[in-house]
Every structure is written in C-alpha cells, then in structure tokens.
Amino acid sequence: MSIPPLDPIAEPRHGALIDAFFDAIGRGDIAGQCAMLTPDFVLYEPAGLPYSGRYDGAEGWQAFLKALPAALGGIRIKRIGLIAEGPDSAILAMHLTARLRATGQPIDTDILEAYRFRDGLIAEIRPWLWNTVQFAPVPQG
C-alpha cells in the first residue's frame, strides 16, 4: 500500500529543541539528551514491541537507550519533520528501518511521535508505529 508523504511545518516553534535532542542522540551525548528532559519526563513505548513499556525520568531514558538497540539492529531513523504543533506539543513524523535481533526479521515502518513540552524541556514522548505487526515473532513451522 502506498501512503502519501506527510508535509512538515515550514517554521516549527519546537523544531530547535527537537533538532538539538536528535543531534545529542546522534553524538551519543546521553548527558546532553537528559538535560533536555523534565525531571518527571515519561516515554511510553507501545505494547507488542520488544522494548515496550513506560520509561520514567533520565534513568528511564537511559534504560530505553539500552533496550532499543538490544532488540533492534541496523537502526536507521529518517526524520521527516514536525507535522503538527500546539503551544506545548508537537507531532514528529519519522521512518524506521531495522532488523529484529531475535529473528533477523526486517522492520520498515512509519512513526509518529507526540511530544509534550514544559519549561522549554521535553516532558513526554508517545510514539505510534504504523505497523507493529512486523515486530511479532515469525511463526516457525
């Protein structure tokens, strides 16, 4: 099925913070990433993923940073851009390709991440993956 591309916002108000956050991720700057999170930050990963769950605070974020590559190899994330914003929120569109480490099964899916902001920091991230079925183990038979 072909899905039309999402058009990013031309001048997003939260773009600089999200860009800085992803730049810190790309550099492996965990302290820099954690400095951009509120003390009560929460990441909610959807059920059915090998790294699903609730990750609280900077410690939770660091646990997620270990859980994701433990479950997926060859992770490539393409940021499409912010597609919606409110005064304290934004929706980021991305595309993920990877491979399940447990089975070698390829992953190829779009992601929308809902961000909430408070006091110039990231307070919450809630990802929605277009095709979580790809994360299920392949039946052996």
Image: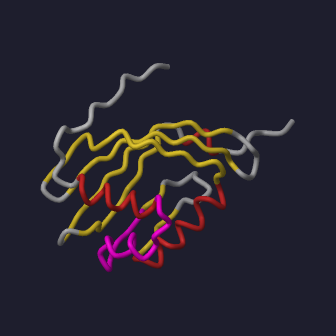
Q: How many marks?
A: 0
In magenta, the rendered stretch is 26-43
Horizontal relation, residue 51 to residue 27: left or right: right
Residue 95 in percent (x, y) is at: 46, 39
Residue at horizontal 16%, vertical 43%?
11
Residue 124 in percent (x, y) is at: 32, 64
Residue at horizontal 31%, vertical 42%?
81
As for residue 118 lying within the magenta part, the answer is no
Look at the picture and state if 12 lies above or below 29.
above
As for residue 38 lying within the magenta part, the answer is yes
Front residue of 17 and 132: 17
Residue 13 in percent (x, y) is at: 16, 52
**Quick one: which residue is furthest to the front in this view?**
27
**Quick one: which residue is furthest to the left in this view?**
87
Front residue of 111 and 78: 78
Residue 34 in percent (x, y) is at: 39, 74
**Quick one: which residue is furthest to the top in this view?**
2
**Residue 107, located in which quarter of the rendered image?**
top right
Residue at horizontal 51%, vertical 64%?
53
**Residue 84, located in which quarter of the rendered image?**
top left
User: Quadrant location of the C terminus?
Assistant: top right
